[in-house]
Amino acid sequence: MFLIEYEKQFKEKLENYSLSKEQLQFTGTPSKAVELSNSDIDRHPILAIENNELVTFFVLHKNEGVKPYSENRKAILLRTFSTDFRHQGNGYAKQSLFLLPQFVRTQFPHINEIILAVNAKNISAQTLYKKCGYKDEGVRKMGKKGELIIMSFYL
């Protein structure tokens, strides 16, 4: 598996990406995320590719994206994280999270922290993030869909 920033050559893969209704309770669609990134240079859509298949998607959001969750100006926000419904249960989300720190160090060398906001009701995502080294330091925010737990991974 490898991580790569979205480019137009991946448009068809993105259009074929599938999320369940349950997943959509907690995350946005990759297509909408890419659309938002077209007008915001601080949003970087990232694809996790395995065997030429798009299996996991997320956005890394700098500057304004971080501000609601952290005062660290050297942090980057991990958002819109999902695994294609047809590829769930194969460890791709975990693998992409393990690849992420080195990817960030390479692509964004000034960044020293990855943060994320996970819905308090999304227990499976919280468990995954903890297994991958993200720390819950007790910070909570209210989001559009309920309470959010802010988690950090220090680089």
Image (spheres, rainbow, N blue to C red):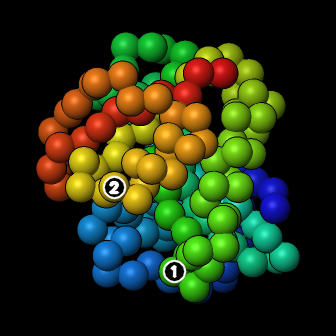
Q: Is residue 106 left or right of residue 87?
A: right
Of 86 and 16, nearer the camera is 86
Where is mark 2, residue-wise? 123
> Is any atom of residue 42 visible in this view?
no
| Residue located at (44% from left, 79% from top) | 19
Under circle 2, the secondary element is helix
Q: Amino acid at mark 1?
A: Phe
Between the C-alphas of marks 1 and 2, the distance is: 17 Å
Q: Is residue 28 left or right of residue 128?
A: left
| Residue located at (25% from left, 41% from top) | 148
Sequence-wise, which precedes: disc 1 or disc 2?
Answer: 1
Q: Quadrant of residue 90?
A: bottom right
Under circle 1, the secondary element is helix
> Is any atom of residue 99 visible in this view?
yes
Callout count? 2
Number of residues whose C-alpha sits closer than 10 Å to that of mark 2, classed few (under 14), some (14–19) or many (20 or more): few
| Residue located at (28% from left, 24% from top) | 138
Q: Is the C terminus in the top left, top right, bottom left or bottom right quadrant?
A: top right
Q: Which mark is residue 58?
A: none
Q: Is the N terminus in the top left, top right, bottom left or bottom right quadrant?
A: bottom right
Q: Nearer the viewer, mark 1 or mark 2?
A: 2
Of 34 and 118, nearer the camera is 118
Q: Position of residue 55 (x, y in %)?
A: 66, 72
Where is mark 1, residue-wise? 85
Q: Position of residue 149 (x, y in %)?
A: 29, 37
Q: Position of residue 133 (x, y in %)?
A: 58, 35
Q: Amino acid at mark 2?
A: Ile
Of 66 and 85, nearer the camera is 85
